Image (tube, helix red, strand yellow):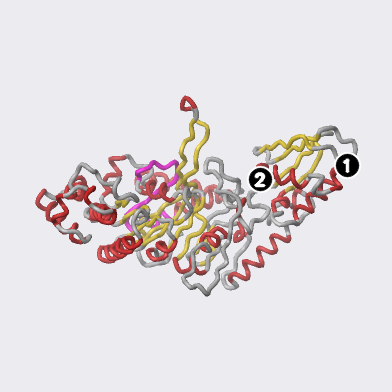
Amino acid sequence: MASENSKRTLLYVSHLKKYFDVTTGFLKKAGYVKALDDVTFSLKEGETVGVVGETGCGKTTLGRTVLALTEATDGDVYFNLDSELMNKLIDLEERFYELNHKREKLPTEENELAEISKELIPLRNKYSLTRLKEREIRKYRKNMQPIFQDPFSSLDPRKLVKDIVSEPLKLLSDLDNDEISEKVGKMINEIGLSDDHLFRFPHEFSGGQRQRIGIARAIGIEPKMLVLDEPTSALDVSVQAQILNMLKEIQENRKLSYLFISHHLNVIRLMSDRVIVMYLGRIAEFAETNTLFTDMLHPYTKALLSAIPSIDPTKRKGRIILEGEIPSPSDPPKGCYFHPRCPEAMKNCGWSPRDMSEPLSEALDPFSDPALSVLPAISEIIEDENDNTLDIVFSTAITDQVRARELIVDALDKASKKANGIKFKAIKSVAFRTPDTLTIGMIEPDVPRLREVRKDHFVSCLIYDAGYNEHKGRKKIKKVTEENTANATENYENPDQARET
């Protein structure tokens, strides 16, 4: 994902994952929450990358894992390395991922993968923050500092401001006490407070002032990157503007890089050079700010940005209302995590038995299709996520299974032509396993990868996996989408043609 921008890459995050264990009684592991699931991006010197998404999408976990405050489950974080070494690592990581996730490899590709692994693994162990021990990470702390959301809980209430601001200097610099005192005085003036404020406690300040103190503490050590986690969300609107303007001024003066996390879309647009849109622990879209806000590609980004109110009362804006609830990160959908709510979903996006149980019950209800009244009542529908099948168990055995199957296939075909019927086109087989049990087989879903569909515009969506023509732009994308939908009407009897091509 390296851009051709002349500025050097300061931070490169490669396929980062963070899974939190879910435990039951007696600390028994019952699964895990996928807070981050294969996140890759880069941050350049002097650049601000914004991170936006719904609550629970993994924004804060991303910031903490990048800073090595939270231990990663997998993936790598490279920070502040020599340009030549950083570019080499980016190339190796991207090629390794491409080859490693290829379903069928040529012998030459197997050999190449082995050679890349031989070179890459020692470099990971030496330079990736996710693989270093705490004492080895310490040397990076000076150059990467956090600014937290709550300016009160992030400041020690028992310490004076002068001690709070000077603490990183004492731990991470070689300055003596006089030099630290002089520097603290300069920092407190730079953030708009006076020397008198140094001898007060945090509770004596307003929320905006406390956030300024947190900023002074972070920048006093002269870092190269700040990770700002909702730095203005706890503040009044008027104070937010002051803090944001101060952050932009500090960035310009000190040539800092920001990883700016927020759920406020307008704040992200104001502050960011590029924007990451996250959904359920994954990156949905990553692009330059103006491009993302004016020519977004991912269906989730379109829905998210449609919520921004217009300041022109005469201009009506079409709001995209997403159906359904956000899935649980402890049990995410198959394939594309967004597909159950996506208005542009295709049949290969991830439909699985748990998506189909209720729709099948409705489609095979005799009240919906009177032709099905000749069949026995359905006693239960059994989901099997591992085999990707559903068993429809009837109350009695069916003697004419051929006729029964014809009626059921016809009902499923009718359901596939209704609104939101695309999930029925993911059915690849319909067959009786026993006289009273009909097995519905689903196609195996595809998993979208974050790919560059336009220059420096990355999207994780299967719509664009079918092909993209940069010169024809959005019209070509729309055509591809329509063709995919049209091709999704194959007969259920032909499972070999049931997958998107």
Outermost left residue: 178
Q: Find residue 341 and name its label.
A: none
Does residue 333 appear left or right of residue 164 in this picture? right
Q: Is residue 431 left or right of residue 97?
A: right
Please give the name of the residue rendered at 53% of the width and 63% of the height, measured from the top-left corner: 306
Q: Quadrant location of the C terminus? A: bottom right
> Which residue lies at the image location 80% right of the left edge and 35% below the top edge?
394
Could you say whether the residue bearing mark 1 is in a helix, strand or loop? helix
Measuring 66% from the left and 45% from the top, which residue is drawn there? 355
Question: Residue 183's x, y, as percent?
Answer: 15, 56
Q: Are marks 1 and 2 in contact (CB under 8 Å)?
A: no
In the rendered image, is residue 356 in sight?
Answer: yes
Q: CA distance from mark 1 to mark 2?
A: 26 Å
Residue 374 horizontal/vertical position (percent): 88, 42
What amino acid is labelled 1 in the image? Val
Between residues 18 and 358, which one lies in front from this camera angle? 358
Dividing the picture into quadrants, the one containing residue 225 is bottom left
Using the rendered image of the protein, determine whether residue 406 is visible from the camera's viewpoint. no
Q: Amino acid at mark 2?
A: Asp
Mark 1 or mark 2, whichever is nearer to me: 1
Residue that lies at the very extreme toward the bottom in this rendered image: 314
Q: Residues within 10 Å of mark 1 (few under 14, many from 20)?
A: few
Q: Is residue 468 above or below residue 284?
A: below
Find the magenta span and give its range: 68-91
Q: Secondary structure at mark 2?
A: helix
Q: Which residue is mark 2?
A: 355
| For residue 185, side relative to residue 256 (left or right) | left
Asked if the stretch drawn in magenta spans residue 76, the answer is yes
Residue 15 position in % (x across, y down): 47, 49
Residue nearest the viewer, comparing 209 with 102: 209
Residue 231 falls inside the magenta stretch: no
Q: Which residue is mark 1?
A: 374
